[in-house]
Image: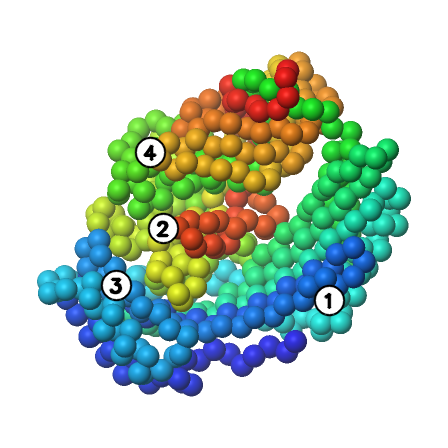
Amino acid sequence: MPSSPRFRPFDDNLDADRALAILRSATDGADDGELFLERRRGEALVFDDGRLRNASYDAAEGFGLRAVRGEATGYAHATEISEASLRRAAETARIAVGSGGGRLAAAPRPSNQRLYSDHDPFDDAAFAVKVELLREIDDFLRGLDPRVVQVTASLAAAMQEVEILRPEGGRLAEARPMVRLNVSVIVEENGRRESGSAGGGGRHGLAPLMAREHWQGVAREALRIAAVNLRAEPAPAGVMDVVLGPGWPGILLHEAVGHGLEGDFNRKKTSAFAGLMGSRVAAPGVTVVDDGTLPDRRGSISFDDEGTPSGRNVLIEDGILVGFMQDRQNARLMGVPATGNGRRESYAHAPMPRMTNTIMLGGETDPKDVLAGLGNGIYAVGFGGGQVDITNGKFVFSCTEAYRVKDGKVGAPVKGATLIGDGATALQKIRAIGNDMALDPGMGNCGKNGQWVPVGVGQPTLLIGGLTVGGSAA
């Protein structure tokens, strides 16, 4: 499908000076506010069991206008980008300002950083070429292993174009591409069926994902995981030490720790980390950063959805809590700088503090030595779904690929393992940190208060003592 003309709301729909005047009237006497304009296009193709099962395309555009006074937020949005709609939205948003008395916070500092190309992924391949690629993936996997009974391959592309107008007159605009390739496979042997999946992507075009060496690698990885699970034994149960592999297992860090380090939860004192700034919250050597500046990564943003440039924000340094992730409202109320973490799902949502790419930095230990230090436990390489209570950090995560370890030797794969614990305690029980920090392949989505945004995670191989492993009897 050909790309659309560049999104230019102030040239095509609105007079910029009039829009600024309306925004200023809405934020007169407020502490902050902005006009966020967006156009988003997305396409997804799913090839399942030898046929194209679903092909979807969606497009939307609109604006959101916000006025902030203290802890109150007035927000209105519309799909029609026009002066009349903007005036109606301003009347609604202004309700939060009340009698005024606020003073606009300082504008975000300007930045020219661009972390990804504005190349439109819709320009990379015709629809028929994408369908043929998915069919080729299906044929390739079935040809690799006669045990394959089902293949599901999906290809997705999206382009989000945003422009932000701030009441002091600043304007920021950029295009944010996103692509992803996923492959899932089911294998059967002796009446037993198991599955495996792999994939990823980032903020770039489709061409890298459609390269033969790439998609074949993804397909082989999905098949490898499925084959491993065919050999898996029932997981043991009980309290034991656990080694987490590098890369995607950082999703446990993201959920169990990352959300608790977002500014709003700490300002409201609902986080397990509230009131602990400057205290030791993790074992020595543990350093956690949220870095939105990594080029082409799924969770990266050149500037956040309030206009603040993204940054590399240190949250935990050598085990000491040193920072939170902040949007402008919570930063102002807590008396600290905004960190570039004000994110929103779309123009229909107000921004809030959100993670970008949340990473635990590597240590100095060879990962082989980390595993050698595991006397009796589980080596968890892949994770599926999980649940977390942000108020206390308690988590439950299911493993999609894990192995039994005894006396430092990796043994049989195990099935049905779940890891149970709480983030604050798990951080304190980290006993070894590998030197193999890796990023995930680009497949994370994060939900908070009904909003979803793309994120990234990363970590090295870690040895954590005393997690509860749920499975069958030991």
The quarter holding residue 376 reads top right
- The picture places residue 177, in percent across and down from the top left corner, at 55, 65
Residue at (67%, 70%) from the top-left corner?
124
**Which SS class for mark 3?**
strand
Residue 55 vertical position relative to residue 255 in the rendered view, above or below = below
The quadrant the N terminus occupies is: bottom right
CB under 8 Å between discs 1 and 4: no
1 vs 3, front mark: 3
- Mark 1 sits on what residue? 130
Q: CA distance from mark 1 to mark 3?
A: 43 Å
Residue at (47%, 26%) from the top-left corner?
421
**Which SS class for mark 4?**
loop
- The picture places residue 429, in percent across and down from the top left corner, at 46, 22
- Mark 2 sits on what residue? 353
- Mark 3 sits on what residue? 74
3 vs 2, front mark: 3
CB under 8 Å between discs 2 and 4: no
